[in-house]
Image (tube, helix red, strand yellow):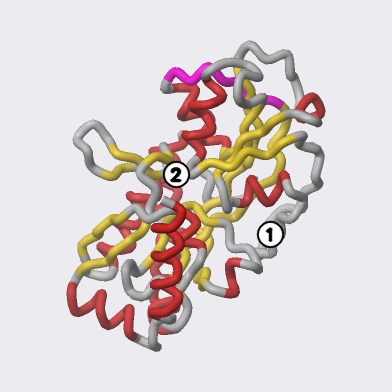
Amino acid sequence: MKQFLACLILAAVAAGPASAGEVLDRVMKTKTLTMSSDPAYPPQSFLNDQNEMDGFDIDVGREIARRLGAELKVITPAWEIITAGNWGGRWDISVGSMTPTKARAQVLDFPAVYYYTPASFAVHKDSNASGSGDLDGKTIGVCGGCTYEAYLKKELVIDAEGAPPFTYDVEAGEIRSYETDTNAFDDLRIGDGKRLDAVLSALPTIEEAIKNGYPMKVVGDPAFYEPLAVALDKGDPAFAAKIKEIVEAMHADGTLTKLSEKWYGVDLTKVR
């Protein structure tokens, strides 16, 4: 599997970035917007009971496509491949709750932030931990290559406009990386300290897992708040400008607020 992923990454790099106007022209010509997403990241994106992609990010992507006069097509490459950039035209856009960090901005464009979410720690319901201070020296699970892993490594840089400041309050004993957050939840649900002592993930994702029967509880205040942006491959400023225009209009007319309230029960489109 690692060799296969490495080959995909090398192929993407070899393909190079998009040419100016190329992506926008393709979307307008084919009337199809291809979006990368995660099939196991509820309530942002997941396969529903009809085996169809659903969730907040999917609804946002579908509305962006509609305003482009296109149909939405969703594919599910690994997160590490999405964040590596140089997509080579295999997909056009990522509406995947991605934090626009300076490192990622070297290979991706972030035309618009569409919502903000708190990153929180969760433990097994049988854990005695009552705050983040109880997690020092513990084994903590996170999604590989994401901001939660960077936070635990004390390497997180969130330099998007409006991002609240944060401090590093937990010294993990061991950081275990997973392909998705839900894989980490699966290891935590086995029992307190069996494989993991805690996980760090988006609060809405944790709450959705708890609602679906995962024996977890949130501890402490959010570690940080992250602005989450639409991501594009570099090289098509016309496409970036169009997406920025659409997302700003979705903020202004209340569409994003309605979608946030639909999936989260609260408006996460503004910093609280």
* Residue at (66, 65) in percent of width and height: 161
How far apart are labels 2 and 1 at the CA level? Answer: 22 Å
Q: Mark 2 belongs to which amino acid?
A: Ser
Q: Is residue 252 above or below residue 17?
A: above
Residue 242, horizontal then vertical, whole percent: 39, 76
**Circle on res. 194:** none
Residue under the image location 71 percent in, 59 percent down: 157
Quadrant in which the C terminus appears: top right
Viewer-side label of 2, 1? 1
The residue pinned by badge 1 equals 158
Q: Residue at x 29, y 64 (%)?
A: 34
Residue in the foreground of this view, choosing between 256 and 189: 189
Q: Position of residue 11 (x, y in %)?
A: 39, 72
Check the image and name the residue furthest to the top.
126
Say whether residue 34 is left or right of residue 119.
left
223 or 244: nearer the eye? 223
Query: Quadrant location of residue 65?
Result: bottom left
Residue farthest front in this picture: 3
Q: Secondary structure at mark 1?
A: loop
- Residue 173 is left or right of residue 72, and the answer is right
Report the span colored magenta.
213-219
Q: Amino acid at mark 1?
A: Ile
- Residue 213 rendering spot, x and y as whole percentages: 44, 18
Up/down of 253 relative to 107, above or below: above
**Residue 196 point in image, percent of width and height:** 63, 26
Q: How many marks?
A: 2
Residue tagged 2: 260
Residue 7 colored in magenta in the image: no
